[in-house]
Image (tube, rainbow, N blue to C red):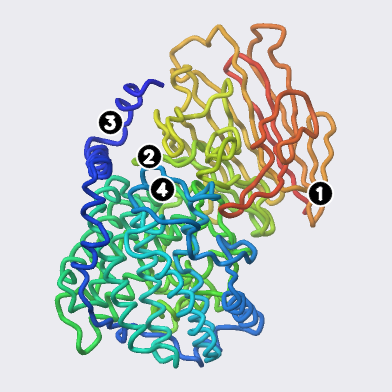
Amino acid sequence: MSRLSILYKALRELGPRQLGLFAWYQLALRSGYLRWKTSPASDKRSSPASILQTQFLLLPSRAELESALDRKSADSLIQEAEEVVNGQVRLFGGPPVPLQLSIPGSLDHWTAYEKGLQVPGIEDIKWVWEPGRFGWAYTLGRAYLYSRDERYPQAFWQHTETFLQANPPNMGPHWASSQEVALRLVALVFAARMFQSAASTTSERTARLATSIAAHAMRIPPTLAYARSQNNNHLLTEAAGLYTAGLVLPDHPQAQRWDALGWRWFNYAIQTQIAADGAYIQQSTNYHRLMLQTALWINKLARESAAHSNHSPKNHDFLPEETQRKLALGTNWLLALLDPSSGHVPNLGPNDGAYIFPLSACPHADFRPVLQAASCAFLGSRCLEPGPWDEMVLWFGCEPQGNQSAAHSQAPIDEIPVLRAPGGDGWAYLRAAHFEARPGHADQLHLDIWWRGINIAQDAGTYLYNAPPPWNNSLAGSAVHNTLTLNGRDQMTPAGRFLFLDWAQAKITAHQQAADGSLARLAATHNGYRELGMAHWRIVERSPSRWLVIDSLLSANSSRQPPPQSYEVRLHWLLPDWPWEIEGDVLRIQSPFGWVRLQETFEQMQKVSEQDGQLTLQLVRAGELLYGPGPVSPTWGWVSPTYGYKQPALSFSLTIRGRPPLSITSRWEFPP
């Protein structure tokens, strides 16, 4: 696409307001204005010493923590805290790696990195940023409140002083993104409260931390236009950082401004970023979790600061009604996608591995801690029975009033396309989104199938955003999702690493309920191939041990005659890396509970050429062809459970050439 065409389509789909804010940010960045506005000298003049006030934040008692943590959870917490003491950290839920808080070589102003300056030896900046979010500080704080081991606060202060010395305000890549600055600010505030009574917490250290928190807060407003242009998690977290700074540094000259800005843009973000069905604007389960955690933190701040006897009444003790309503919808939406056996959710959309408040011993991929806390805070009751996921409820202080049962209100049944098999062994999620903001993945009518806590038909995830090809956010395309592709094209037009244009819009066209009120059948379509005159339709039906998926390619206009030419149609499924066998049109994979069977059949009304109707099966693992003919992409046959990590999977596809109307039927059968 030409730049003029991209600009026109972006203006049409993103709107003049967002593009205007982004253009202003780029002008301010490239003109040198932001370098002047956030120079280290101006920071020193604008950040006088302030008294850090965190005493209003309530913490769980040691007895409460002991009751929430079973032996296994406690051992896991202490083990991870010991790793941090010894200079190791787990990034994005992965294995321990060295905790790197300084940047090799000399530092430049943050604007140089935003304009493209690379950190030596680092291909993806997120490996630099993640330790600088200070997620490891929460681990040390939890371990300290549980064990009262003074080595944990001492490790926090040593690592923090290393970071502050190596990364002075506005210098280096750790200051390039206001979102990273805001998340670090919040972590520093939380840590200051958790280590307030520690022997190693001196008045000198606390004063230096207050000065640093003020410098972090000063960095956010000059680039708030960029966050507003994105209107996603950037705006949400930056608002949270400002609101936090305004509360804990009340004597700072900018405190009232930070407070007002943070409160305004946080509520604006929640009210505009959560759709009517509860879906988050970034169409991502991981960013959805980040949104709920940010809201839990603001909810805690607002209530506990207002309840404090010495707190100014200018702040708000309750979230606005519309904000609460949207958060209830958002909680229900993610609850509908929760696998009850594993605590996992579909790896939907962009996944940068963010877990900004790791306040639970549950694994990184377990969404139950956040959903239990969000359900308590925004629905007024627990959604799950008691378990190790309850620890997060203690930290966010959102225990519901009374002994309420595990019940929650549900969105209308046709708004969240989830089907659950009778008996509870399996469920499926059909992706059918109507985009009101830029999509992260081209994944319309993708189908996630879960069975006995295992993600059978799965989403590939993200892996890396910023690596060289082929791993430059390449798992966002249609070809790696469980859906149809036509003539090798994405459903939407890729126009950049993070930008799709010509948005494909989907809709649920029919649904059928079973006797118990659950969904038994769904039908949906999307218009991603409208330029080819085609529409993809998908029907999903469930029974106790079988799923039936019917994919049809039809003319986009029912009054038109069938097209004279044939199309290459590819149906793809991403499966676990299990033993397999193929016989005819049947693939069998060996699960821990027996063989899972997938049979593919193809039907078409009319042939155009001798090649029509020829069905080709292909199986790829880790970018290598295992079965069938044809070219292979190095990105096929991989799944990324969290950012920066990938593991082999089975990429099973059926390719046919045919003239619409045509259909492919996939019959999934599971052991009883």
Residue matched to label 3: 11
Separation of disc 4 and disc 3 at Cα?
19 Å
Q: Residue at x 31, y 55 (%)?
A: 235
Label 3 neighbour load within 10 Å: few <14, some 14-19, many 20+? some
Q: CA distance from mark 3 to mark 2?
A: 12 Å
Other-residue count near label 2 (Cα within 10 Å), few / some / many at <14 / 14–19 / ≥20: some
Q: In the displayed structure, would residue 83 be above or below residue 653?
A: below
- Quick check: marks 2 and 4 in contact, CB under 8 Å? no
Image depth: mark 1 or mark 3 in front: 3
User: Looking at the image, which residue is at 44% across and 93% down?
Assistant: 199
Indicate which disc, 3 or 2, sits on the residue closer to the N terminus: 3
What is the distance, in whole Å, between disc 1 and disc 3 at their CAs? 49 Å
Q: Amino acid at mark 4?
A: Gln
Q: Amino acid at mark 3?
A: Leu
> In the image, what residue type sits under mark 1?
Gln
Return the disc, 1 or 3, that comes first in the chain's sequence: 3
Q: Which residue is mark 1?
A: 590
Residue corresponding to mark 4: 282
